[in-house]
Amino acid sequence: MGANLHIKHLEGAKRANRLILIVLALIVSTLVWAHYATLEEVVIGQGKVVPTLAVQQVESLDGGILKQVLVREGEIVTAGQALLVLDELRFASAFDEAQLSRNALRRQRARLEAELKSVNIDNLANHWLAKITVTPQAIEMIDGERSQRSQAIFHSRLSQLNSQLDQAEQAVEQKIQAQEENRITTRAQVSGLKLVRQEIAMTREAVNEGAVAELELLKLERDEIRLEGELSASKSMARQLKAVKSQAIGERLTLALDFRSRTEAERNEVINELAGLQESIKTLADRLERTKIASPIDGKVTNILVRSLGAVVEPGESIMAIVPSDGALIVETRIAPKDIAFVHTGLEATVKFTAYDFVIYGGLKGEVIYVSADAQQLEDGTTYYEAHVKTDENMLNGWPIISGMQASTDILTGNKTVLNYWLKPLLRAKANALREP
């Protein structure tokens, strides 16, 4: 009986020892695991999504009267898509008028260039008539047609020039005719003078012989003097007629030169007017184009301020806003002052969106790109530091993330072992021990 009790007592002691060993092994294993096992240390912040690009205000540079609104609040638009239309009447009428003026100037330029091509001057030509040639040239077609008015002016001006040239030609021909008559007279005078001189020589011999009275010789000598005077006058007239002829030829040439000079000056003036008008047309076309106001970026329409058709839009007035949809997302998050010590740029973060269940949809990885240098306050007096987390993507597994969504951010500040977490209350208690509050 006693032996049985002793055996049972030994068996119970063995079981107790085994249990103690198991418990000690579990404690040691747990401590070893806690010493090596690590947990992420995160700082949690609350904030909202903002775009990396600034919200674009849609404005009109020139202003005008609202004619049509093509989008609605919240509508997704693309860059270049028309948003609204302003009344284009004032710009359209000025643009059309400027185009009409431009076409008129282009026709005038074409006419003037045809006139210049039609009148040619060759100073090296041998004959005076060949120095000027008037050969009408075709006027260049403008917009597929020729202006009847331009054609009429063209032919009228050339006809007027031809008439002036004909008159000048007649004047030259008259001078040539006078020269010819002068040459005939001069030849006759030379011949007559020669005969008189022969007759004087013969008469002088007869007078010397006493066959003829000396009075006859005096009459012949008087005729010689008269003929010499007439011949001298004819030669002087020949020189005058030559100068007058050259002057008449020069006046005819001046008519053509003046015509070309006036035409070139008029053409240059038209070219200058055209250049200035082209700039005006470009400006008016730009203004006309700006009556159709387009979105500068891809994004969502918001804050439409002018809706009433016929409303006056002032130059530079904000009409609506476009929230950008392109680019990475930025989460503006608020960090409690007690957690800010280990938050700095470059830390990894996980962004969780309240609109999507994290368990189902997960979150987006990101990086801290900004931490405010000083604390800020909300309206209720709550103090916080602002941090910006830039996400790697702008879609959550294919689901859209839009500006204004609420989000929480888990900023990874480091790693601690499980043992450190267990010892943290003891270490805090030790630090506060033996002190009277």
Image: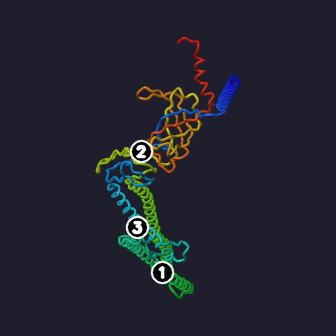
Marker disc for residue 393: none
Give the CA separation, mark 2 to mark 3.
Answer: 45 Å
Q: Considering only order in the chain, which callout, 1 or 2, is on the residue closer to the N terminus?
A: 2
> x and y percent of residue 156 in the render?
37, 72
Single out the mark in the foreground, 2 or 3. 2
- Left or right for 364, reference 99: right
- Residue drawn 54% across and 36% down? 410
Q: In this orientation, which residue lies closer to the viewer: 233 or 215?
A: 233
Residue 87, percent from left and from top: 32, 54
The front one of 174 and 64 is: 64
Disc 2 is placed on an element classified as strand
The quarter of the displayed image where residue 416 is located: top right
Using the image, determine if residue 165 lies above or below residue 79.
below
Which residue in the structure is indicated by mark 3? 107
The three-letter amino acid code for the residue at tag 3 is: Arg
Depth order, front residue of 237/62: 62
* Amino acid type of the residue tagged 2 in the rendering: Gln
Q: Residue at label 2?
A: 57
- The residue most toward the bottom is 211
* Quadrant of the image occupied by residue 436: top right
Task: Calculate the distance from the C-alpha at mark 2 to the C-alpha at mark 1.
Answer: 91 Å
Instruction: Please report whichever mark, 1 or 3, sits nearer to the chain's N-terminal start.
Output: 3
Residue 305 position, x and y percent, is: 34, 44
